């Protein structure tokens, strides 16, 4: 009996407890199912990719969309056009707050259906001031109401963008045509950019977007409307998958009042230049020095 | 890129520069668009007058529509045209300032319009008629900042379709009626959303 010392008993007991605790600590790993493929995990930053690597990634993303959503899509890499700097203006005198722009964005950009997400938020504000704090987005009565005006807010594609500065991993940056983009595969979902944006223009994918196969917009680009994974930031890209091919943004086409004017600010004959030169134009929160490329104006 | 100077500051500058530029500078922008002939910008223009719904219905219960000229021929008593509230015109709402029918419709030819100075006008030129009173709006429209459009902002790459005044504004009652807004997004944290 004396060959089992008290010390040995404690050692065995301690080792058993330790092994049990270790197994318990690792238990979540046994339940872990990979949500990211090895290829996606090892993928480099968008700016470091060469065309061949990018091509492989685009095909992989198309396959994943087909597998996850049952939708056959085309994901392109659409680059800025030389000599183009985008500008967008919105006429507050004619906007009626109908949210058709937000709805068009919802569908065009493959947003999550249950949350009805959109890159555009329409504020209903009392006439006589521009008090954003008192603006409401949850109105559901017939519009417009006589004592209110309506201010759609989306990404302003700032030239001095706070969201770009705060990103700790450089997953978001400003492109040559002025559009601020996100590499959804590089984003770590820290939401610093969401907090930094004074226009509340960035969105976070709390959950994997749910979209019925027949509603997925198949015309997609890597930096814009491809279906985003859960846990990453997303934002308005002025529909770069359309606008970099010369088309108008979806929100403009949907606007029933013609409140929206879009174009190349470097083209002196463009509609956007006419608005900037002839209308009473202002930018939101000018005092912050963000230098937006999105402008508001009034008639008269 | 030239090698960085062998100082720690130089290394930091070099690293910073690397991380914000494209590894392949050729990927930063795409190909240029050739300057060429622009695609057409088409205006969605009305070419025929609509019909007036009457109280009469066909076998399916659909109101029978008649053209203005059916009753208001060139020889018709002008008093007809000055009675928009007459019960026959149940489908015609007239709420356009103090204007009566003859202010725009040509009494001599009901298929045409006329300007304030009396010149007769094709229906396709309706915008000239509207512009007589709504000049600043017309200027804004001409410059692409009123009325909405579809297609291409860059007309070198594709055509554009623009709305006409009467696509959105019923000429007899141009004030647009209130509409029900589309559903809103449910944002966490906004207005008490969970």
Image: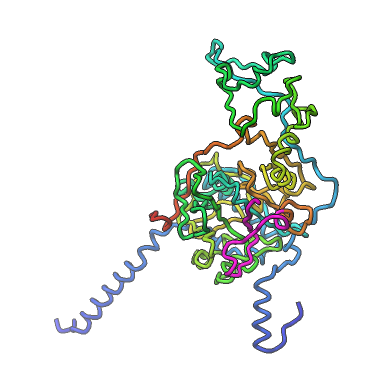
Q: Residue furthest left?
A: A1
Q: In the displayed structure, would residue A1 be above or below residue B194?
A: below
Q: Residue furthest top?
A: B59
Residue B164: x, y in percent? 70, 36
Q: Residue furthest bottom?
A: B7
Q: Nearer the viewer, residue A78 or A140?
A: A140
Identify the magenta region. Answer: A275-300
Q: Is residue A283 magenta?
A: yes
Quadrant of the frame with the C terminus of chain B:
bottom left
* Residue A295 placement: quadrant: bottom right
Residue B107: x, y in percent? 73, 21
- B44 displayed left or right of A26: right
Q: Residue sitting at 57 percent across and 16 percent down?
A: B88
Q: In the displayed structure, would residue B106 be above or below residue B57?
A: below
Q: Nearer the viewer, residue A190 or B182?
A: B182
Q: Nearer the viewer, residue A152 or B83?
A: B83
| Image label count | 0
Q: Residue sitting at 63 percent across and 35 percent down?
A: B169
Q: Is residue A143 magenta?
A: no
């Amino acid at each position: 009996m004396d060959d089992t010392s008290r010390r040995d008993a404690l050692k065995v007991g301690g080792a058993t407890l330790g092994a049990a605790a270790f197994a318990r600590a690792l238990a979540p790993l046994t339940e872990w199912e990979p949500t990211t493929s090895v290829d996606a995990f090892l993928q480099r930053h968008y700016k470091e990719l060469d065309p061949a690597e990018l091509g492989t990634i685009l095909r992989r993303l198309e396959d994943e969309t087909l597998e996850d959503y049952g939708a056959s899509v085309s994901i392109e890499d659409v680059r800025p056009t030389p000599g183009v700097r985008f500008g967008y203006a919105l006429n507050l005198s004619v906007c009626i707050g109908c949210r058709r722009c937000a709805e068009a964005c919802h569908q065009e950009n493959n947003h999550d259906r249950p949350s009805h997400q959109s890159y555009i938020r329409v504020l209903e504000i009392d006439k006589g001031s521009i008090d954003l704090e008192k603006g409401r987005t949850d109105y559901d009565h017939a519009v417009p109401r006589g004592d209110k005006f309506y201010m759609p807010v989306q990404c302003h594609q700032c030239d001095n963008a706070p969201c770009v500065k705060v990103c700790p991993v450089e997953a978001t940056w400003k492109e040559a045509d002025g559009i601020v983009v996100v590499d959804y595969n590089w984003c770590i979902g820290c939401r610093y950019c969401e907090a930094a944006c004074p226009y509340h223009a960035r969105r976070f994918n709390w959950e994997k977007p749910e979209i019925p196969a027949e509603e997925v917009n198949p015309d997609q680009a890597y930096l814009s409307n491809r279906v985003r994974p859960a846990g990453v930031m997303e934002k308005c890209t002025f529909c770069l998958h359309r606008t970099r091919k010369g088309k108008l943004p979806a929100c403009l086409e949907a606007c029933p009042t013609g409140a929206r004017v879009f174009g190349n600010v470097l083209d002196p004959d463009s509609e956007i230049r006419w608005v900037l030169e002839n209308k009473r134009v202002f930018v939101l929160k000018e005092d912050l020095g963000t230098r937006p490329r999105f402008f508001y104006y009034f008639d008269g | 890129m030239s090698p960085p100077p062998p100082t720690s500051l130089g290394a930091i500058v070099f690293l910073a520069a690397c991380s914000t530029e494209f590894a392949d500078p050729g990927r930063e922008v795409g190909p240029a668009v050739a300057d060429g002939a622009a695609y057409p910008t088409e205006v969605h223009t009305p070419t025929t007058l609509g019909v007036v719904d009457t109280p009469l219905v066909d076998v399916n219960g659909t109101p029978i529509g008649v053209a203005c000229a059916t009753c208001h021929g060139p020889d018709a008593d002008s008093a007809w045209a000055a009675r928009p509230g007459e019960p026959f015109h149940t489908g015609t709402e007239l709420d356009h300032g103090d204007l009566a029918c003859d202010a725009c419709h040509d009494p001599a030819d009901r298929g045409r319009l006329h300007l304030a100075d009396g010149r007769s006008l094709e229906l396709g030129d309706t915008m000239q008629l509207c512009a007589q009173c709504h000049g600043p709006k017309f200027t804004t429209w001409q410059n692409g900042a009123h009325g909405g459009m579809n297609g291409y902002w860059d007309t070198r790459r594709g055509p554009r379709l623009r709305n006409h005044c009467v696509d959105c504004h019923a000429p007899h009652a141009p004030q647009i009626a209130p509409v029900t807004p589309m559903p809103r997004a449910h944002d966490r944290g906004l207005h008490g959303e969970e």
